[in-house]
Amino acid sequence: MKIETFEYTENYCEENIWHLCQHPDLTDFSKKVLIVSNKSKNCPFLHQKSSIDQQAVWWDYHVILLASKGGVNLVYDFDSTLSLPSTLNDYLRLTFGEKSNWRASDFPAFKWIDALVYTQTFFSDRSHMKDLEGNWIFSPPHWPHIESAEKLPLSALMDFTETSQQRIYSLEEMENFDNVI
């Protein structure tokens, strides 16, 4: 698959995945939106397009799609240099494989939300992409911002504390995904 066939704007992973959830090529897949972060909102990712000299990119959060069909779990990460899609095992191993150099607080944590729920409830006014003066930090997508009557805000998805409304999974739990969900 080529990224050019999907709606994509750099640095707007939550909106890119919102569109991907509705892509006709994935209709027959069971889909879960994965939000990746941690309590410190500073999580290292390897094999990212914005990496300099193949160093880890430290995201405050990242949103990817897990699509499953016939016992195969595929990850769609538009910001990764890995194949699109990648198997879940390959993605986790290659993206987070050098954890021996990381502090325990750097380890990624994962939340998931069913793709249908995500597309029906997620909204983003993009305010997190503006500086204090109201200027864009990154140019916004060409499509209108995502609205929803139920208003599942990005801030709720980014809560990786004990007060989170969604269950939080460790990297080890995600490595054993078939036993998690």
Image: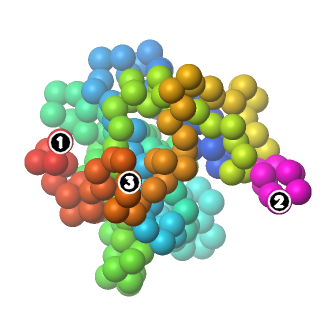
Please, is residue 154 above or below residue 101 in the view?
above
Q: Quadrant of residue 113?
A: top left
What number is the disc on residue 55? none
Q: Is residue 137 magenta?
A: yes
Stretch in magenta: 130-138
Within 10 Å of disc 1 (Cα), the crowding (few <14, some 14-19, many 20+) is few
Which x, y percent locates residue 170? 27, 62
Q: On the image, numbered disc 1 is attached to which residue?
A: 181
How many angstroms separate mark 1 from mark 2 (CA)? 40 Å
Which x, y percent locates residue 137? 78, 54
- Identify the amino acid type marked 2: Leu
Q: On the image, numbered disc 3 is attached to which residue?
A: 164
N-terminal of the two: label 1 or label 2?
2
Q: Is residue 132 magenta?
A: yes
Residue name at image x 62 percent, y 60 percent: 50
Is residue 4 in view? no
Left or right side of 70 for 66: right
Which x, y percent locates residue 39? 43, 68
Q: On the image, numbered disc 2 is attached to which residue?
A: 132
Q: Nearer the viewer, residue 20 or 156?
A: 156
